[in-house]
Image (spheres, rainbow, N blue to C red):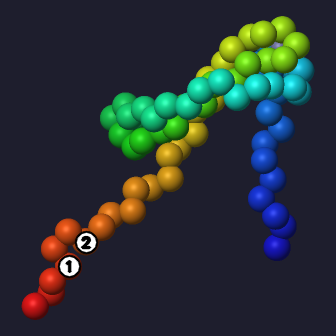
Amino acid sequence: MTPFERPDRRCPKCEHKGYMFRARRAVDGKPDEGGGKFVETKYRCRSCSHDWWERIPAPPEQKRADTGDAA
Ligand SMILES: [Zn+2]
C-alpha cells in the first residue's frame, strides 16, 4: 500500500509553494454539483500575498440511527 500523498499545493498566481492557512468554511454544493457538502479552505501565498480558496468534498456525515429501537 502506498501512503496517501497530499497534493502539491502551490499559489495559482505565482506558483510559489509556501502558503499560510487563512480560513475554512463549509458550503452547500449546488444541485448540479450533486448537492453535497463541501469544505472550502482559504490560503495565502507567502510570496505574493495572493489569497485563494480551495474546495474539496466534505466527508459524508455519519448518520445516526435516531430510532434505533428495532423492537
Ligand atoms: Zn503567489
Whether residue 14 appears in this view of the structure is no
Disc 1 beta carbon < 8 A from ligand 1? Answer: no
Whether residues under marks 2 and 1 lie with C-beta atoms below 8 angstroms apart, the answer is yes
User: Which quadrant of the picture is home to ligand 1?
Assistant: top right
Q: CA distance from mark 2 to mark 1?
A: 5 Å
Mark 2 neighbour density, 10 Å: few (under 14) some (14–19) many (20 or more): few
Question: Element at badge 1?
Answer: loop
Inspect the image, locate mark 1, and give the three-letter code of the amino acid beneath it: Gly
Determine the residue positioned at 36% across, 40% down: 35
Q: Which mark is residue 68?
A: 1
Which quadrant: the N terminus? bottom right
* Image: 29 above or below 61: above
**Residue 56 picture location, percent across and down:** 57, 39
Question: Element at badge 2?
Answer: loop
In-image side of 52 versus 19 (left or right):
left
**Residue 31 picture location, percent across and down:** 33, 35
Whether residue 50 appears in this view of the structure is yes
Determine the residue positioned at 87% across, 26% down: 18
Q: Quarter of the image holding residue 66?
A: bottom left
Determine the residue positioned at 15% across, 83% down: 69
Residue toward you, 53 or 19: 19
* Image: 60 above or below 50: below
**Residue 12 picture location, percent across and down:** 77, 19
Q: How many marks?
A: 2
> Where does label 2 land, which residue?
65
Determine the residue positioned at 44% across, 55% down: 60
Inspect the image, locate mark 2, and give the three-letter code of the amino acid beneath it: Ala
Q: Which mark is residue 42?
A: none
Mark 1 neighbour density, 10 Å: few (under 14) some (14–19) many (20 or more): few
Q: Quarter of the image holding residue 50?
A: top right
Q: Quarter of the image holding residue 14?
A: top right
